[in-house]
Image: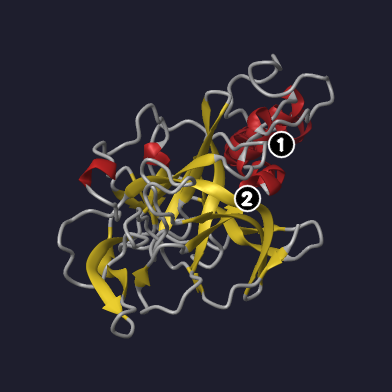
Amino acid sequence: MSLHRIPNLITSRGIALGSALLLCSAIGLARPPESFALVFQNESTEPTETIPPDFPYWDHVTQRRYGGPTVIYLGGGWALTARHVGYGEIILGGMPTPPERGIRHTLLNPDGTIADAVVFPLKQGYPLPDLPLLPIATRAPQTGDEILMIGFGRLRGDPIEWGAPGNRKTALGWTENGEKRWGTNRVVDAEKWLRQNNYRTVSFTTHFDMVGDENSTAHEASATIGDSGGAIFIKQDGQWLLVGLINSIGTTIAKPSQSTATGDITYSTDLTHYRSEILHWTRPDCANEVDDDGDGLIDYPEDPKCENPEDPNERPEARMSTEWRTWGWAVVPLIVGSLAIAWGRQRQRTLNTPDSMSSLSAR
């Protein structure tokens, strides 16, 4: 894998999506002409559906509280986002849900360096949506693969022109606020190392192409500020799978800040390279794709010792140990208290009953 260092890289405290025109993404300065979150060549290329057709994981993509960047709910009480976004309260089912304080796991590369991705558990006791565990792809995306992008990036704003007379260029400004939108693109470079600040991340890239270009897609999109932590899905063998995590945007030309132009680049973490670590931290034994008890049977429903996918152990004895740790300490005080009461009563009866020898001598 080659190492990419892009000087014009914007780390995404957010990145929305945009489509073809001469522009890139959906973010905008202040006065968007319309409330669309993506930029398209014309209305016929903009998705008319709020949710992508035949897509079951729309509600898994959410955001940090107070209109923050994008976060992916993995199911089972765990969330995933870009490391530079950080962990914190997220919105689930329309309600803010806090994380477990002080618990988070930055994903690591084989050499121990840190990637721009983090998982964290949500605080127990808060209601969680009844959503399935999110499947993560095992096959890395390849050049030419079409992908689905979802994020909370900013909306498109007014067009911006710059350049000398006779060589005018156009980009699109960004609004101050974002909106959840989806778009499509195609992988250009796969399995690239992206070095950014202290992060070193296996990534893949997509480019924002003009409509009609041989590489463009029906709803060609590019990320913008607000989409950091956003989800990249791919359809493999007829199944939608999470394959990437939006983390940065870059440009190949000098242009006004807070704008998007044709050719802009979206960088996304290739989650297939971090899949085993994600499962290690976020999945119970009966859904982590590991034969934890060594019986040759893996997870529910293949392993009959697993009662359901949320079962924390493939070993019944370990499950009993876990259950004892969960409720056993609540029972111990009751047992000790009962024994103390019984001992106290027995002692009282002994004190109140004269023994035979002392009774005879008193006579």
Q: Which residue is mark 2?
A: 270
Which residue ends up furthest to the front in the rendered image? 166
- From the top left corner, tell me how far across and down residue 311 is, in percent: 61, 28
Q: Which mark is residue 69?
A: none
282 or 189, which is in the foreground? 189
Q: Is residue 326 left or right of residue 65?
A: right
Numbered disc total: 2
- From the top left corner, tell me how far across and down residue 293 is, in percent: 80, 27
- From the top left corner, tell me how far across and down residue 2 is, in percent: 74, 62
Location of the N terminus by quadrant is bottom right
Closer to the chain start, of discs 1 and 2, is 2
Location of the C terminus by quadrant is top right
Protein image colouring:
secondary structure
Q: Is residue 215 above or below residue 203?
A: above
Secondary structure beneath disc 2?
strand
Q: Amino acid at mark 1?
A: Ala
Secondary structure beneath disc 1?
helix
How far is the residue under mark 1 from the one under mark 2?
Answer: 93 Å
283 or 223, which is in the foreground? 223
**In this view, the mark in front (1 or 2):** 2
Q: Can residue 265 be seen here? A: yes
Q: Which residue is mark 1?
A: 362
296 or 220, which is in the foreground? 220
- From the top left corner, tell me how far across and down residue 309 is, in percent: 59, 26
